[in-house]
Image (tube, rainbow, N blue to C red):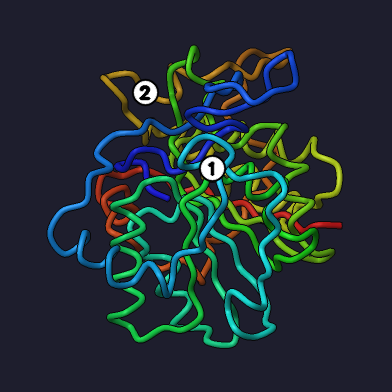
Amino acid sequence: MTDDLPNPDSHPGSDSDANSPSGLPSRHRTQPVSFVRRGSRLQGRRKEAWEELADTYLIDVPRSVADTSVDPGFVLDVEAAFGRAAELVVEIGSGLGEAITHAAAEHPERDFLALEVYKPGLANTMLKIRQAGLTNVRVAQVNAPEALATMLPEGSASEVWVFFPDPWPKTKHHKRRLVQPSLAPLVRRALRPGGVWRLATDWSEYAQHMRQVLDDAEGFRNLHAGERAGSESPLTRVWQEGLENVAGVTARAGRKAVLTEEGRDETDELGGWAPRFEGRVLTSFEAKGHSAGREVFDLAYEAV
């Protein structure tokens, strides 16, 4: 998923649906969402792709109310959807499909499922699937937490990817972030034992939030605990060199201070950052971040 698109997924709840106090479906969810629905109209090649390719690549998801909701009684038959039994990789917020289609081409022995709410992005992904002649990618227009909770069979995924989710940087919007304590058990449910949850962001404060959420979550183990700490930590570099700058405010100035007896600590002693995931192609979004001098934070946690 990419930050320059409407955020393709959410904290539990989408744009309309949830259970009302009466137990009957309401027209609106009660939980905040991490995506903003805008620009969903299809035009040109994307419209043609949707009309021509949806029957082949798009999972037909029964809805409860909203067009991104998942009927809680629906369970995806993964083998039937792909026509075979293979390891399944799920990407939450696939954006324009750059990462997932590249990975699928590199690993034809695996199956890949793109979860996305942004319809033009899904159309673009289907175009890329056809152009590359791939048979191991399917897409679904869904609110990912719902898909993880009920649509995907328990233990069906070998990996779950969350790459560059919208950081919602304003404090009042943090509740909209995709990676929340409530998401962790849903990802754990979908992953098989030994499966891996991979995450990446170029926003240091969100990276710290992600690390804390996963460190606190039951059923996960940091595959790189203690690594890239101290002077080797990308977080230390951001703090000490002021690598991020948003509206004229450096990340160091805006971050929550880590206090010691000596005062503010400018070193990330915790670490736990993974090396850059080699299976993630350098997308145009990530390349722009590198050009702007932003640091990318990778995390990898094993389901135990």
Is 227 situated left or right of 132 in this image? right
Q: Name which residue type carries label 1.
A: Asn
Q: Front-most of 135 and 252?
A: 135
What is the spatial separation of the Cα atoms under label 2 and label 1, in whole angstroms? 33 Å
x, y percentage for residue 172? 49, 12
Give the mark nearest the N terminus, 2 or 1.
Answer: 1
User: Do residues under tags 2 and 1 come within 8 Å of each other at their CB atoms?
Assistant: no
Crowding at mark 2 (Cα within 10 Å: few <14, some 14-19, many 20+): some
* Residue at 51% from the left image edge and 71% from the top image edge: 279
The residue wearing badge 1 is 143
Q: Is residue 187 above or below residue 82?
A: above
Is 46 situated left or right of 58 in this image? left
Is 260 situated left or right of 89 in this image? right
Mark 2 residue element:
strand
* Residue at 67% from the left image edge and 49% from the top image edge: 148
| Between marks 2 and 1 in the image, the one whose residue lies nearer the viewer | 1
x, y percentage for residue 294? 36, 43
Q: Name which residue type carries label 2.
A: Thr
Is 284 situated left or right of 149 in this image? left
* Residue at 81% from the left image edge and 50% from the top image edge: 220
Q: Front-most of 275 and 112?
A: 112
The residue wearing badge 2 is 250
Residue farthest left in this picture = 44
* Residue at 53% from the left image edge and 52% from the top image edge: 92
x, y percentage for residue 182? 72, 32
x, y percentage for residue 65? 53, 35
Crowding at mark 1 (Cα within 10 Å: few <14, some 14-19, many 20+): many
